[in-house]
Amino acid sequence: MTVARPAGPDGLVVVDKAAGWTSHDVVAKSRGLLGTRKVGHAGTLDPDATGVLLLGVGRATKLLRYLSPLGKSYVGEVVLGSETNTLDSSGDVTATHDMAGVTLDQFRAAASTFVGDIEQIPPMVSAVKVGGKRLHELARQGIEVERAPRPVTIERLEVSAGPEPHVFVVDVTCSSGTYIRTLAADIGRALGGGAHLRNLRRTSVGPFTLGEAVPLEQVSPDVVRPMADVVRHLDVVTASAEVAEAVAVGKVLGPDRIDVAGAGPWAVVDTTGHLLAVYERFRGDTVKPSVVVSAR
């Protein structure tokens, strides 16, 4: 006789990742801590970086697509005068420059030119694929390839003096897909020399902040947030008991069944606030589910 294993938790964990862990490492460790294989992350964080890493657990792994595109905020230190092959402090120094004369005002002026819609060339140590291979895999083989620039948006870039001369602290809010290490290197070049990044810390992903994050050692089923929390940044629609039954089986709904406005998507919850599905615009006034999770 086969005994069914108890289902693991469903929902969101906001982790404050420590330095030295890859995002994959955090997922692997969390599987054991949470008692389920169904754990995934939204938005890779470099091993040397710390801060907010979002984990989808159980049925919430289906919802990670709505987290990955969210904007992010970071704090890091830009070290003027030296370039590295990884654009951060983990790499080998490839060039040095005398930038002793750069002032805080000059750094701010250079940094301000990167605010708004810009283009970045992904670093060779990134997970971007070129010719079917990830750049970091090619970099480990000593191969460097041409990379097409990608559009990103720097929404906010504040600069303050760092802990030592020629080090400046940047506080950045940006679109998904922005590389802060590339931003640091580009600012260094704009100042007539070079720079690299160190001590990067992600302070938020969309509405999820460090204030609600827990260190990996505290991850347990008790800290898993409800399914509805995963998509709390979406517009919420509350379904009646009758409509909830239709939503649970993924029916296409017309305006006579569900009242939505705008372009969507919408998080559809029952009258108790439990997430049932995420719906998107279909044809005209009708909507259809992109993800159905139902409520237990």
Image (spheres, grey):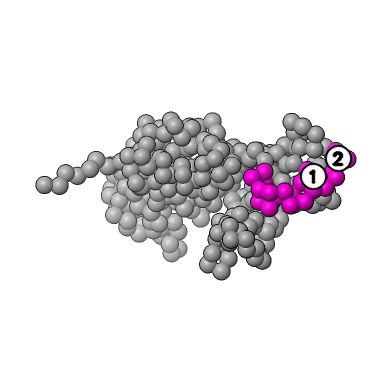
Left or right: 75 in relation to 248:
right
Left or right: 42 in relation to 147:
left
Q: Residue at x 48, y 32 (%)?
A: 214
Q: Residue at x 46, y 35 (%)?
A: 216
Left or right: 161 in relation to 37:
right
Q: Which residue is at the far left?
A: 1
Element assignment for label 1: loop
* Residue type (three-letter) at the residue carrying disc 1: Gly
Secondary structure mostly seen in magenta is loop
Marks 2 and 1 in Cβ contact (< 8 Å): yes
Is 22 or 85 nearer to us in this picture? 85
Point out residue 74 in the picture as x, y percentages from the top left corner.
Answer: 63, 40
Quadrant in the picture for residue 146: bottom right
Quadrant in the picture for residue 152: bottom right
Is 221 or 294 nearer to us in this picture? 221
Q: Is residue 204 above or below residue 70?
A: above
What whole-number distance in Å separates the C-alpha atoms at marks 2 and 1? 8 Å
Give the magenta-colored segment's residue range: 80-103
- Residue 84 drawn in magenta: yes
Q: Which residue is mark 2?
A: 100
Q: Which residue is mark 1?
A: 81
Q: Residue at x 68, y 53 (%)?
A: 85
- Count the marks: 2
Q: Dot 2: within a 10 Å radius of its alpha carbon, few (fewer than 14), some, or many (20 or more) residues?
A: few
Point out residue 266 in the picture as x, y percentages from the top left corner.
Answer: 45, 50
